[in-house]
Image (tube, helix red, strand yellow):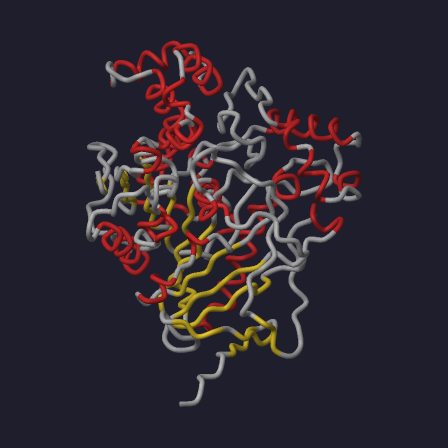
């Protein structure tokens, strides 16, 4: 039997060779913008010049410069991927399709999380075979991170990582038909920082017409820094580097030095007279906006976009359990955490305690973190979207509790991802330090969650009623 030849697709920029897989075809490391090298790291994404001949799309892309991340006893490599894999041409997408050039299938474009400083298309959790298997063309996106992606600098456009995602969506609009996708049926979805970027897209005029639906998993519609907060981060970065806080000065500095100064930026006090820290000290980088996306939806395409949005029930556990913080936290720790994210921390803690009077200090601290980072901004976005979209908002609450770390990890931040990607049975997610722990997951849960996401991408209906702000409720999943 002769071996099947590798598939080749003709894109507007040039031909790309992929590989056949059990689910269809896989094309990797396709550039959607020019390489962000040197001074271009602080410029808007520029069109890729294209190429002659057939580009090799069988090998993974380089990744954006990023630090190593350590989550204590929890193995988060499937989430973060391999870290910094050097190479200038990392503004790329991977595409999985049932078959290129045949049909007009729903398209889903995934934007990874990682605190605006880490992550890539190479992470094992974003494999995407299940989407291609089920008739979806899946696109995963790399974008600029950290200093090149999000540090606010004079002489550079703000939110360059967001501009990269916009450029990738523009590439999808122009190119995805040759991979068998329907450019009129694009769903952009993301998790954590990726979901927060999608919230910003919903309020961005330039995003109009680039996608029909959006999914925000554990993100926030109120997660942006104010310009005043951004100036503090920029000043600290410039001081650490010994240069002026301008794009021209930063353009001369190698990426290695940007990573080296990250410890000096950790723990900055970003509270101001008008704002608390939307990222609770977990990252000095993020969107910089004068108005939060949830309060600016009428500026963008949100009214014409179906939205699926939700959180996990124990989001804050990811930031405490792997380091032993769930057990070691004190009442003083709870108050200190609340002070980062609330103007009146004592009242905020009292409100959480009223809901869970038997909670330990660690559990209360997790609740404060989860609500501030994801819960409050998610519900503000859901309410705002429901008001302007006329019944096109669906809300979920994911409650399956991972048995990792002696059963303590629970329904933490990121735990829903293996269910969305229908990869919950993969052995690298299990064991005591694996994201899902030693126990098998409930039969049918991953298939059901994945099917709901696919259904939403195809029809705008994940299988439960739209959110009604007059009678607010969220669809419970896995709890």
Residue drawn at (32%, 46%), measured in percent from left and top? 308
- In the picture, measured across the screen, residue 374 lies left or right of residue 264, that is left
The residue nearer to you, when weighing 5 against 308, is 5
- In the picture, measured across the screen, residue 230 lies left or right of residue 7, that is right
Residue 173 appears at what percent x and percent y? Answer: 49, 63
Residue 246 appears at what percent x and percent y? Answer: 76, 36
Q: Is residue 440 visible?
A: yes
Q: Is residue 298 visible?
A: no
Residue 211 appears at what percent x and percent y? Answer: 43, 56
For the N terminus, which image quadrant? bottom left
Residue drawn at (50%, 55%), measured in percent from left and top? 121
Q: Quadrant of residue 361?
A: top left
Residue drawn at (36%, 71%), measured in percent from left and top? 22
Residue drawn at (23%, 42%), measured in percent from left and top? 477
Q: Quadrant of residue 259?
A: top right
Q: Quadrant of residue 460?
A: bottom left
Above or below, 477 relative to 237: below
Tally of marks: 0
For the C terminus, which image quadrant? top left
Residue 474 appears at what percent x and percent y? Answer: 24, 37
The residue nearer to you, when weighing 178 against 173, is 178
- In the picture, measured across the screen, residue 258 lies left or right of residue 462, that is right
**Residue located farthest toward the bottom when viewing the structure as drawn:** 1
The residue nearer to you, when weighing 62 against 391, is 62
């Amino acid at each position: 039997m002769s071996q099947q030849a590798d598939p080749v697709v003709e894109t507007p920029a040039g031909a790309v060779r992929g590989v056949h897989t059990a689910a269809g075809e896989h094309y990797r490391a396709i550039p959607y913008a020019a390489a962000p090298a040197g001074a271009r790291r602080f410029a808007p994404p520029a069109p890729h010049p294209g190429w002659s001949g057939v580009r090799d799309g069988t090998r993974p892309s380089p990744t954006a410069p990023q630090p190593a991340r350590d989550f204590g006893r929890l193995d988060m490599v499937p989430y973060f991927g391999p870290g910094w894999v050097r190479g200038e041409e990392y503004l790329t997408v991977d595409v999985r399709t049932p078959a290129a050039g045949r049909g007009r299938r729903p398209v889903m474009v995934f934007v990874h999380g990682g605190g605006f400083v880490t992550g890539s298309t190479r992470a094992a959790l974003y494999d995407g075979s299940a989407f291609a298997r089920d008739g979806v063309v899946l696109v995963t996106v790399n974008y600029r991170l950290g200093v090149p992606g999000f540090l606010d600098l004079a002489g550079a456009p703000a939110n360059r990582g967001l501009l990269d995602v916009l450029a990738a969506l523009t590439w999808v609009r122009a190119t995805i038909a040759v991979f068998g996708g329907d450019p009129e049926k694009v769903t952009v979805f993301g998790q954590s920082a990726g979901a927060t970027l999608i919230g910003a897209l919903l309020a961005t005029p330039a995003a109009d017409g680039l996608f029909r639906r959006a999914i925000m998993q554990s993100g926030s519609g109120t997660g942006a820094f104010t310009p005043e907060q951004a100036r503090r981060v920029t000043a600290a970065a410039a001081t650490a580097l010994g240069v002026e806080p301008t794009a021209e000065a930063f353009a001369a500095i190698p990426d290695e030095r940007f990573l080296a100064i990250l410890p000096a930026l950790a723990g900055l006090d970003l509270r101001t007279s008008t704002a608390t820290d939307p990222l609770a000290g977990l990252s000095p980088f993020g969107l910089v906006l004068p108005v939060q996306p949830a309060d600016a939806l009428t500026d963008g395409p949100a009214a014409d976009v179906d939205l699926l949005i939700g959180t996990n029930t124990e989001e804050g556990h990811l930031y405490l359990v792997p380091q032993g913080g769930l057990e070691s936290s004190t009442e003083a720790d709870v108050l200190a955490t609340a002070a980062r994210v609330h103007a009146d921390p004592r009242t905020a803690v009292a409100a959480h305690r009223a809901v869970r009077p038997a909670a330990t200090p660690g559990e209360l601290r997790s609740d404060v973190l989860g609500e501030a980072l994801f819960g409050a901004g998610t519900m503000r976005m859901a309410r705002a979207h429901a008001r302007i979209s006329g019944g096109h908002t669906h809300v979920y609450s994911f409650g399956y509790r991972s048995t990792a770390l002696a059963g303590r990890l629970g329904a933490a931040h990121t735990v829903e991802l293996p269910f969305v990607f229908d990869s919950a049975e993969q052995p690298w997610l299990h064991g005591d330090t694996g994201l899902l722990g030693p126990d098998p997951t409930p039969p049918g849960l991953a298939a059901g969650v994945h099917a709901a996401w696919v259904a939403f991408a195809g029809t705008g209906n994940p299988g439960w009623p739209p959110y009604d702000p007059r009678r607010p409720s969220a669809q419970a999943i896995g709890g």
